[in-house]
Image (cartoon, rainbow, N blue to C red):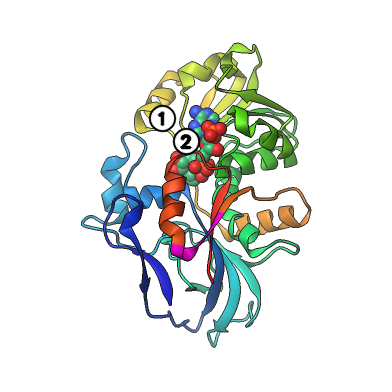
Amino acid sequence: MKAAVYRQYGPPDVVRIEELARPEPKANEVLIKIKASTVSAGDWRARSLQMPAGFGLFARPVFGLFGPRKKVLGTELAGKIEAVGSAVRKFKVGDAVFAYPGFDMGCHAEYRTLPEDGRLMHMPAGVSFEEAASISFGGVTALKFLRDLAKLESGDDVLIIGASGAVGSAAVQLAKHFGARVTGVTSTPNLERVLALGADRVIDYTKTRFQEGGEKYGLIFDTVGSTSFSSCEGALKEDGRLILSAGSLPQILGSNWASRRSRKKVVAGNAPERVEHLHFLKELVEAGRYRPLIDRTYPLDQIVDAHAYVETGRKRGSVVITMA
Ligand SMILES: NC(=O)c1ccc[n+]([C@@H]2O[C@H](COP(=O)([O-])OP(=O)(O)OC[C@H]3O[C@@H](n4cnc5c(N)ncnc54)[C@H](OP(=O)(O)O)[C@@H]3O)[C@@H](O)[C@H]2O)c1
């Protein structure tokens, strides 16, 4: 099978298309013929080892000390079941599925095996493979931080920084679904796009600092790592929370320290990704409450161009890779 392989860390062109052996499903596994995947911010970071400041030290132990441990990137996929192991009960050949192996990677290839009890679901009705492949990276991250970690409630005033990114565009839609009043922070070319996602209001960060409008938010979700507790404190309500999902180590530690005597809190860290997250997002897609935002689509052969575009940090939603 064709796969995008990287054998050393570095710029986009360390990724090469190679022929690899097609995996065989074990008894409890399915073999998926992948139709679409994405190149996410996670793929770009794992390929380049560019991490938010302070996290660089942990990168090689996580991804491979002397070179990449997982040589095929790709955190999410959509495709069709090609074969099933003898013990598989939930899926059959021909089923359309989407999956989120996350940092187990391996989706930039024509085939991937996954356990039937893994983060794998039947595709929502009425979406393309490209859309289904784009549900999870942004959607699961936004869901974990907004619902599981920050305990977003109906009626909250939420500010989302980076509202046009994969995480931010999902966060806007999820926060609206949970009944929040949403303000998106983005740049001029993306204002209309963020309003179309459902934001009640947008702030153009190239013209206005959100701290200067006098508004107070119950929740500020910084999806890009552009702020800190000290710079947001005045814009948070008395018991407000600041989510730092992409902060540097100094930003997170400094923000935790600065908030220690305040009722306002910092939410950082991580939570496990669960199949329930996919189930929740699938139902939201089917109810018309969440539609992943797609920027560009590249064939697998042009994955180097896709990596280069993602690395600009300017993509809107997901960059999709399609398999022939
Ligand atoms: N902690 C976790 O579990 C976790 C999970 C997933 C991702 N992440 C991290 O979260 C970050 C975002 O991920 P992503 O997938 O959403 O990235 P992304 O899709 O590449 O984000 C790109 C978007 O960010 C916007 N942006 C850049 N700088 C901005 C700023 N100063 N203010 C407002 N918007 C800005 C850009 O819009 P403009 O062009 O308009 O500026 C662009 O649309 C990455 O650093 C990723 O590594 C963390």
Quadrant for the N terminus, please: bottom left
The three-letter amino acid code for the residue at tag 1 is Ile
User: Residue farthest to the right?
Assistant: 287
Instruction: Identify the residue shown where x is 68% and y is 55%.
Output: 280
User: Residue 126 location in percent, x, y?
Assistant: 75, 62
State whether residue 86 appears in this view.
Answer: yes
Name the residue rendered at 46%, 46% in the picture.
310
Q: Position of residue 286 (x, y in %)?
A: 76, 57
Task: Identify the image quadrant of the C terminus.
Answer: bottom right
Quick check: can you spot residue 243? no
Q: Is residue 302 above or below residue 29?
A: above
Mark number displayed over residue 268: 2
Q: Residue at x 62, y 81 (%)?
A: 89
Other residues around mark 1 within 10 Å, as few (<14) / some (14–19) / many (≥20)? many
Is residue 16 toward the left or the right of residue 242 in the image? left
Q: Which residues, given as a range, are shown in magenta?
A: 297-301
User: SS for tag 1?
Assistant: helix
Q: Is residue 71 left or right of residue 260?
A: left
22 sits to left or right of 130:
left
Q: Nearer the viewer, residue 25 or 20?
A: 20
The disc, 1 or 2, on the residue closer to the chain's N-terminal end is 1
Q: Residue furthest left?
A: 66
Please give the residue where the numbered disc 1 appears in the rendered image: 252
Q: Is residue 139 above or below residue 27?
A: above
Q: Please state the horizontal and vertical placement of residue 23, each as a whole percent of the image.
A: 43, 79
Classify mark 2: residues with Cα within 10 Å, few (<14), some (14-19) or many (20+). Answer: some
Q: Are marks 1 and 2 in contact (CB under 8 Å)?
A: yes
